[in-house]
Amino acid sequence: MNFTKLESAGNDFILVEATGRKLDWPRVAAAICHRHFGVGGDGLLLLLPSEIADLGMRIFNADGSEAEACGNGLRCLAKYAVERGLVAGGAEEISVATAVGISRARLYRQGNNVTKIQVTMGTPKFEAKEIPVAVEPDKGNIVDIKFVSNYPVTIDSQELLLSFVSMGNPHAVCFWPKPVSDFPLSQLGPAVERHKLFPNRVNLEVAHVINRKQIEARVWERGVGETLACGTGACAVAVAARLLGYTDNDVDIKLPGGTLEVEWTGVGEVLLSGPVEIVFSGEWPEK
């Protein structure tokens, strides 16, 4: 089985053209993503045909669980498809069907190379049942109709004030007054991910607002652990910051692996941009 490894700001994926293949994909994902006994990656991307879009995509986390959405994975898949000639060579935009709807990818080129990809990430959702999160109505603050912010959760005697956003997958954003390098993410991340508040588990972002155009962040990704970057996580941070009045419509999210650009006006779809690189290709035993 041929595969290609790609990365965006250090968020790395193994991509497989899965048309006609019927494998135990959760098992394959856990094996191929293993950092020591596999290729190593944060997730497995399956490129599939689609009757409603140019391409289809499924994404499996490193632990084998299937994710609903993945912004960096979406951009990696778009670059691969264009540079491998799977879509029209001169296309400026392509569509990709995912588990949470159709996303559009706008392509920026230098010659034959795609240097930057901007994708639509859908409209964020805030209702507790849509995230989902089992909030108690007398805690936290309600902003902009139904956005729940500063919801107190205590983990290992540390109180975290969390803001909840769905970008197709669940996110809890913690704004931190200090540099994010000081946050004990490896200690608190697993506990928040599997907290009883979150029936489908959750991605945890810790974010520090530098100014109205820049936020630094780290991400504990559900089913993966800490990642160098996360597209939906960057979007969740930008959305929460915009609603709380911390930032403007356009903001750079500075992650350990690089910077992602997020645009959101406060209504409608979120736009995510950033670099994508193909790392290498190889073969994996199909079994």
Image (spheres, rainbow, N blue to C red):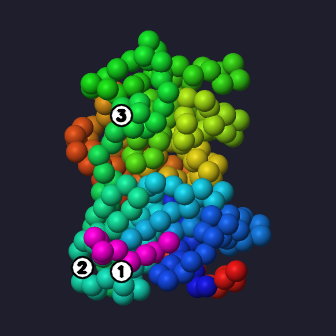
Relative to the observer, which residue lies in front, 286 or 113? 286
* Residue 50 forms part of the magenta stretch: yes
Crowding around mark 1 (Cα neighbors within 10 Å: few <14, some 14 to 19, many 20+) is many
- Secondary structure type for disc 3: loop
Numbered marks: total: 3
Task: Tell me where residue 268 sits by quadrant.
Answer: top left
Image vertical order of residue 67 relative to residue 27, above or below = above
Task: Decide if residue 5 is in sight here.
Answer: no
- Secondary structure type for disc 2: loop
Please give the label number shown on residue 82. Answer: 1
**Amino acid bearing label 3:** Phe
* Residue 76 forms part of the magenta stretch: no
- Secondary structure type for disc 1: helix
Residue 275 in the image: x percent, y percent?
42, 65
Q: Residue at the location (31% across, 82% down)?
A: 87
Please give the label number shown on residue 91. Answer: 2
Residue 84 in the image: x percent, y percent?
41, 86
Which numbered mark, 1 or 3, is in the foreground of this view? 3
**Magenta part of the chain:** 46-54
Q: Is residue 285 left or right of residue 143?
A: right
Residue receiving disc 3: 126
Q: Residue at the location (72% across, 64% down)?
A: 35
**Amino acid bearing label 2:** Ala
**Amino acid bearing label 1:** Val
Q: Main secondary structure of the magenta part?
A: loop
Residue 192 in the image: x percent, y percent?
61, 33
Task: Tell me where residue 29 sits by quadrant.
Answer: bottom right
Kindly check if marks 1 and 2 are in contact, taking CB atoms under 8 A apart as contact: yes
